[in-house]
Image (spheres, rainbow, N blue to C red):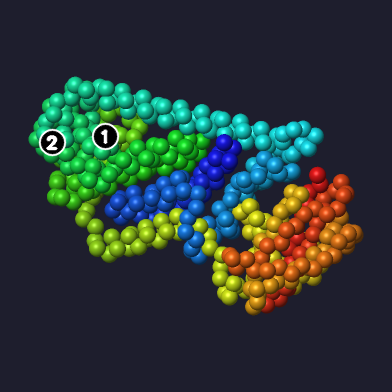
Amino acid sequence: MEGGFVTILNMSIAASWVILAILAVRLALARAPKKFSYWLWIAAGFRLCCPVGVKLPFSLFNLLRTDDMTFVPADLGMMAEPQVSTGSLAADSLINPLLPAATPQYSANPMQIWLFAGAIIWIAGAAAILLYGVISYGLTAYRMRTAVKLEGNVWQSDRVRSPFVMGIWKPRIFVPFGLNDETMRYVLAHERFHIRHGDHAVRLFSYGLLALHWFNPLCWLAYRLMGWDMELRCDEAVLASGESRTAYSETLLALAANSRRFMPGLSGFGETGVRARIKNALRWREPKRWVNAAAAVAVVAVVTACASDPAVEALETLDSCFVHIEGRSFTAQAAKDFNFDYDKLPDLIVDGEGTLVINVSVSGDTLTVGEDYYQALGTNGTTIKRETFTLNRDDDGLFRLPVKRRGTSSEDEYAVYYIVGDDGKYSVRVLFPAS
């Protein structure tokens, strides 16, 4: 259960960065057709339901210096000094001091208890939101049992205040009685566009993702904005068929006055962002071809970058050395030509033991790494171990060195690792906190 919760947390953190990127790109696409803004949400949906993506060198997550998309380590509950790496130093500095340290004298670490409690709360919240959606959907279906068939999949009911689509395999359009011919034409054009493009299924799927990530406020914002973009895209499609902007806007206004209830998973004609939709409809113009082309290229690039995982840079192109602790997302650039100025060395933290992952250019399949182990840092430190290792390249083109705390002191201990690459010697410092 805790493992599933950690997986959800990692997906939610990744999706948060994607949502922030989408919000920025939406601003740049403000004057472009809204279908392009709507398509951007594909990346957010992918990140919210899939923990891994194809590795590409231009992934958004290369900017976060993360290699394996592990923001919350799977063994967080067992760490002596639990730490997460969200990709934001400011967020990490706020979160990590709050995480409780291990207590070996007890049968369970506090962090294990926190994770268990968090998993229980997450499941309870997800179940409550799903239950609300199911009950709301069921009550709406029950109210529609007296609906009268008008034509095809169009049904009329005196219990409908604003038109909407309901159903998955055989979706129906429900409309109120008393709509004139012009209003009915607009409504059916709008709702049939939704059905042709599977928007009714997208609504249900996105509500399910919202239930899984209910604790993330950015997901609630994304759910709302995606609904707006979906409706704006549909409005523009109707207007592109030659309908009057003014008359269509008047229809939106009239039916919006009858819609006051949130219907999870349902696509309602006058439910979402009506004021913005009316403004957009009144100023809508047929877009120029170059605008469509430029927006399409931008959307493909952004979605690809957001949905992909960071790829390890080809060793032949490296002119530096990058290192990280396996299972942690933070990647450090090792210092070149170290001159014993310890303050300039990048720090990695290992609780007890871990694996140092090294990405450096070497001509062969082996790498030489030296280790100087200290009980205290700096010129007054006592070297208690000096050793040299020869590492073999793994299937990912990387080198892995198991590292662990070697001393028995009650203070922090350090190790400096010297990595001999083709274009120089690199150094990195690993801190082993006092237990």
Tell me if residue 250 can be seen.
no
How far apart, in angstroms, are the residues tagged by discs 1 and 2?
14 Å
* Amino acid on which disc 1 is placed: Gly
Q: Which quarter of the figure has residue 389?
A: bottom right
State the mark number for residue 167: 1
Across and down, in percent, residue 351 comes to: 74, 49
Which residue is located at x 47 percent, y 32 percent? 126
Q: Nearer the viewer, residue 153 or 40?
A: 153
Across and down, in percent, residue 32 comes to: 31, 55
Across and down, in percent, residue 167 comes to: 26, 34
Which residue is located at x 71 percent, y 54 percent? 354
State the mark number for residue 12: none
Of pointers 1 and 2, the one earlier in the residue sequence: 2
* Amino acid on which disc 2 is placed: Gly
Which residue is located at x 72 percent, y 36 percent? 109
Above or below, comparing residue 385 to residue 204 in the picture: below
84 relative to 127 in the view: left or right = right
Judging by the rendered image, the residue that carries numbered circle 2 is: 152
Across and down, in percent, residue 352 comes to: 76, 49
Tell me if residue 362 can be seen.
yes
Q: Residues within 10 Å of mark 2 (few under 14, many from 20)?
A: few
Which residue is located at x 51 percent, y 46 percent? 11
Q: Nearer the viewer, residue 367 or 271?
A: 367
Q: Is disc 2 placed on a helix, strand or loop?
A: loop
